[in-house]
Amino acid sequence: MFATCAWRQDAYAVRAVLFAMNNPARNGREIERKFLVKELPPGLDRFRSYPIAQGYLANEPGGRHVRLRKKGKTASLTFKVGRGRAREEREIHLSGKQFAALWPATVGRRLRKLRYEVPWKNLIIEIDSYRGRNAGLVVAEVEFPTHAAARKFQPPSWFDREVTGEKRYSNVKLARE
Amino acid sequence: MFATCAWRQDAYAVRAVLFAMNNPARNGREIERKFLVKELPPGLDRFRSYPIAQGYLANEPGGRHVRLRKKGKTASLTFKVGRGRAREEREIHLSGKQFAALWPATVGRRLRKLRYEVPWKNLIIEIDSYRGRNAGLVVAEVEFPTHAAARKFQPPSWFDREVTGEKRYSNVKLARE
């Protein structure tokens, strides 16, 4: 029986890899840099934007956490571990019912923002304009395919200083109501 | 005697309904007491049992956590907050794919046990016989509909001392590998 259990765990691992290969949701390592924004780029309304509401089910002191998010009409649950440029991330899409069952558990640990997706060179800059108690805060995040690309990145002139890994600007922190 | 049997059937019927519901599963407050087990009750093999594998995505120091579980073939994600007799709980069922995508994140925070569901008076006693590094540990949990029922509970003679709320016997703690 225990051999069966161990085998099952292996099978889960294999399925997880296959799933990650086929699934649009990202699973694995993300390499990101975060900046404050001096001024919004011109013509921002041309770009795609989504209202985002997110809340946290549990946050460990070291940065490990489980997040619920509604982005437009899409709901997801995301696990992240680590801080700074490189973090492990695992994400699943949730049905509306699944999301509705868990969302009440995030009371007091939520935030809202409007996200713009701005193509820039061969990258996408995500601009987050916060709502609610963080209104006025605007942050840009850029995800990179490699550490080299992250190092070489030349921020556009409308970026302000880099805040990658700064606790104060982490979403977990900003979600404390 | 007849009344006892009817109660048992009700308890099973309620469980069956919960089992059959897709989303959400149990959400709300659970009132539970936990005991060590002196000796296993006779004829344990007559009762339903399931292998359980569970792991933790994130645990806060105060007991708030997010758990992944596979019980038999059913996968779930559960949020719990609080310690001791009364805890808030929210649970959703996961598809095999959803479970497989998140399970690798629980490495080093897992446990395995065999659960027996033993009808006792108008209640179900869940007996958990741990596997792996916790092998030899046997714990019984009883869930109650009200605080009054929890107070009035008379443990059967094969129960050992109560360990409700004792950190040492929390599953989060037992899952540290």
Image: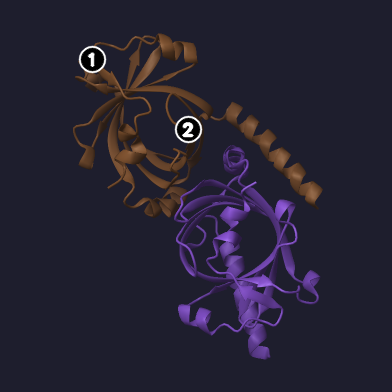
Chain colours: A brown, B purple
Q: Quadrant of residue B96?
A: top right
Q: Earlier in the sequence, mark 1 or mark 2?
A: 2
In the depicted structure, whether residue B22 falls above or below residue B139: above
Query: Which numbered dot is residue B59?
Result: none
Residue B159, located in which quarter of the rendered image? Answer: bottom right
Q: Secondary structure at mark 1?
A: loop
Q: Is residue B20 visible?
A: no
Say which residue label 2 marks.
A82
Left or right of B139? Residue B80 is left
Which amino acid is tagged 2? Gly
Q: Judge the density around disc 1: few (<14), some (14-19), many (≥20) Cα neighbours within 10 Å.
A: few
In x, y percent, where is residue B173? 58, 54
Give how far across and how far down residue B14 sits, in percent.
Answer: 58, 71
Q: Chain of mark 2?
A: A
Q: Quick one: SS at disc 2?
A: loop
Are labels 1 and 2 on one chain? yes
Residue, x 67% and y 82% (percent of image)? B156
Residue B53 location (% of width, % of height) = 67, 51
Q: Amino acid at mark 1?
A: Trp
In depth, the one of A160 and A42 nearer the eye is: A160
Residue at (20%, 15%) from the top-left corner? A42
Identify the subunit bearing mark 1. Answer: A
Mark 1 → mark 2, Cα distance in angstroms: 28 Å
Q: Nearer the viewer, residue A18 or B61?
A: B61
Horizontal side, residue A96 vs residue B99: left or right: left
Residue identified by numbered label 1: A158
Q: Is residue A167 above or below residue B54?
A: above
